[in-house]
Amino acid sequence: GNLLSLIVIMKFLVAVVLSLFSAVFADDQSYHRLSDPSTHLKVTSCRNINTDLFGDEPGTCESVGYTEACVSCRGAMTFMVEDISTCSQESTECYFRTEDEECIGTSQCPYGKEREGDRERAHKGLRGQVNCERLGPGSATMCVELPYCEWDDSNYPPKCHHI
């Protein structure tokens, strides 16, 4: 008798807890989170979120004007932007892509300031320069001869060789 009553009460309590849990955490409403421009995605972006746990605004990104999908090349996370041209491989230095593009990879990316700096250094030649660095207090000094680099505007990276 008592065991059966206890089982019935436990089942009832579990059902109540589950329904409360569902009411609190099951939310059919959509939310969105705006992110400020960053180093590589230089415009405000938006992410669709399924909860307002962190105070995110109700509605989807699309409902507030962010209608173009922008996919990160690392992690394949989707961000929404207002203008698809702000999310090309070229405009993000290969950190993001449109849905129609394939990620090139940042080490092979021909766009951006880092590549322009490589181009300038290559044009200067760095012919036969030596870079030396002390390995630590009281230890030996290691020297490395920098290669001579030739820039071919049709290819990246520049062709480098020791002379």
Image: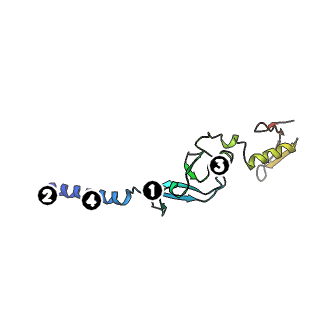
Q: In the image, which disc is placed on residue 16?
A: 4
Three-letter code for the amino acid on which mark 2 is drawn: Asn
Q: In the image, which disc is placed on residue 85?
A: 3
Q: Earlier in the sequence, mark 1 or mark 3?
A: 1
Q: Residues within 10 Å of mark 3 (few under 14, many from 20)?
A: some
Q: Position of residue 79 (x, y in %)?
A: 56, 51
CA separation, marks 2 and 3?
A: 70 Å
Three-letter code for the amino acid on which mark 1 is drawn: Ser
Q: Secondary structure at mark 1?
A: loop
Q: Quadrant of residue 109?
A: top right
Left or right of 115? Residue 72 is left
Q: Do the residues under discs 1 and 4 have CB atoms within 8 angstroms?
A: no
Closest to the observer, 136 or 105: 105
Three-letter code for the amino acid on which mark 4 is drawn: Val
CA separation, marks 2 and 4?
A: 21 Å
Closest to the observer, 94 or 159: 94
Would you name the residue on which mark 2 appears? 2
Select label 1 or label 2 by which is in front: 1
Q: Residues within 10 Å of mark 1 (few under 14, many from 20)?
A: some
Furthest residue toward bottom: 55
Would you name the residue on which mark 1 appears? 30
Residue at image x 64%, y 53%?
41
